[in-house]
Amino acid sequence: MINLKEEHKALVFENGILGFYRDADVDGLFCVIANGDNNYLKFGIVENSLLVVDKNQAFEQDKLNVFQANKIVNGEKQLKISFSQLDGFPYVGQIVMTVNQYS
């Protein structure tokens, strides 16, 4: 599991609703659901993991960076995770936390 960065504080509320407290000068967090390609299992990312991405984090080699792919599914461009720069794919942000949900 990837630890939440110091400037972000995670809060889990009742009924499994996840919320965030952020310092006033920190913006740009968004969440996406991981698909089932199973490329990042050792980082705790499995199918349907909630991935919290910070758009304000700069690209860092060997970190879980997120890029926008050209593939469109259900009218939305898909995202791609990579440890290295992906030529031709715009950088979106860096994963700062993963959450696995079990039922």
Image: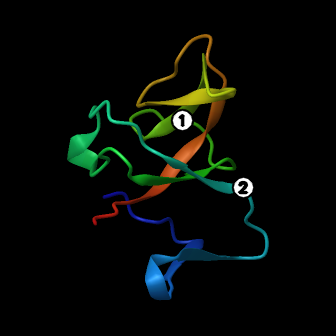
Residue drawn 33% across and 44% down? 47
Q: Which mark is residue 84?
A: none
| First in residue order: circle 1 vs circle 2 | 2
Q: Nearer the viewer, residue 75 or 32?
A: 75
Where residue 36 sits in the image (x, y, percent)? 33, 35
- Answer with left or right where residue 41 lies relative to residue 18: left
**Residue 52 horizontal/vertical position (percent):** 53, 55
- Residue at horizontal 58%, vertical 71%? 8
Amino acid bearing label 1: Val
Q: Which percent across, then down, holds residue 50? A: 45, 55
Tell me the element at label 2. loop
Residue 66 disc label = 1
Give the residue furthest to the left: 42
78 on left or right of 25: left
**Number of on-image labels:** 2
* Cβ atoms under marks 1 and 2 closer than 8 Å: no
Which label is found at residue 28?
2
Disc 1 secondary structure class:
strand
How many neighbours does mark 2 have within 10 angstroms: few (below 14), some (14-19), or many (20 or more)? Answer: few
Q: Is residue 48 visible?
A: yes
Q: Is residue 13 above or below residue 28?
A: below
Residue 2 vertical position relative to residue 91 in the rendered view, above or below: below
The three-letter code of the residue at mark 2 reads: Gly
The quarter of the picture where the C terminus appears is bottom left
Q: Quadrant of residue 1?
A: bottom left
